[in-house]
Image (cartoon, helix red, strand yellow):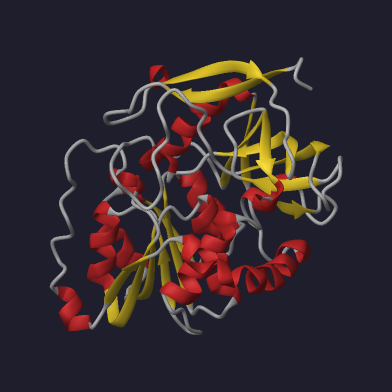
Amino acid sequence: MTTHTNREWHLLSRPVGWPKPEDFALVETPVPTPGEGQILVRNTYLSVDPYMRGRMSAAKSYVAPFELGEAMEGGAVGEVIESRAEGIAVGDHVLHSLGWREYAVVDAQHTVRVDPEAAPLSAYLGVLGMTGLTAYAGLLRTASFKEGDIVFVSGAAGAVGSQVGQIAKLKGASRVIGSAGSDEKVRLLVEEYGFDAAFNYKNGPVSKQLREAAPDGIDVYFDNVGGDHLEAAIGSLRRDGRIAVCGMISVYNDTEPAPGPRNLARLIQTRGRIEGFLVNDHRDLQPQFVREVGPWVASGRLKYRETVVDGIENTVEAFLGLLRGDNTGKMVVKP
């Protein structure tokens, strides 16, 4: 395999504000050779995710920044084409974290075998993967969802948000409201995903649209956006309401600190709470998540969409499209 060429994306400079194509380079390298206990994987699908924007900065965070001049990383699923690891054979399919490239040498102990017969391979990066577990853990554990709750989800047509809303409905929410960035996505939320109401946040103030969609207020807000959405949710929060902060994509490319919600004092009146979370802190829920969500997906009770971008050369554009909100559901790249 060492005579073959691998293409991988490197970060050349740390973006200031919105990332630009010139911050990245697609580099050709020899296909690496696996050592003892390692496997060589031909990546079938690559994941691009909002958290990757944080890794492009040198600022200290919960995960190490990407190194300049080196291959970036991210979720990927692919086929094993060479193995020097016991228990993993050529032809097996695995989930791993060395994306942004066509071929990857991975320590076998850091991979998870997946079954392409049980679900499409791309699903293991989304509805049955990290984004699915994020939705499940954030709603059920961090937000302490209970039957009868009124739930509001921002970024609701995205990979995480769409699953949050559907899980809430399947678990007995009395009402689920979503926000999205286009009228087409709003229709998708109501007509396909079963949301009770949805609105296009570009059509008017979020606080006003949320009050119209949830006149009795909300018990749970699952935050993927931050900014005016978070302020609106605090304004509509009912007694003992809970807010789970998953992401704040509206401020990821800001060059100055974004102002905080102006109505935090309302948490005193409502006895509400806001809690941030990371999916890696809830890996213990993975078996329960698979047992419960897997059958929902297989039976069609939980629906999902994917936006698939073809070509390793288009990975950066797929990532920028994700930040713009171009995707419906999980954004993946097929190298």
| Residue at x 41% of width, y 38% of height | 323
Confirm whether residue 215 shows in the render: yes
* Lateral position of residue 96 relative to residue 113, left or right: left
Q: Farthest front residue?
A: 36
* Lateral position of residue 211 relative to residue 92, left or right: left
Picture layout, residue 272 above or below residue 235: below
* Lateral position of residue 65 relative to residue 105, left or right: left
Picture layout, residue 192 above or below residue 125: below
Picture layout, residue 179 above or below residue 291: above
Picture layout, residue 17 above or below residue 85: above
Tell me residue 258's x, y (percent).
19, 47
Total numbered labels: 0
| Residue at x 70% of width, y 23% of height | 31
| Residue at x 59% of width, y 36% of height | 99
Can you say which quadrant of the picture contains the N terminus? top right
Can you say which quadrant of the picture contains the C terminus? top right
| Residue at x 43% of width, y 52% of height | 155
Q: Quadrant of residue 26?
A: top right
Tell me residue 293's x, y (percent).
67, 68
Confirm whether residue 208 shows in the render: no
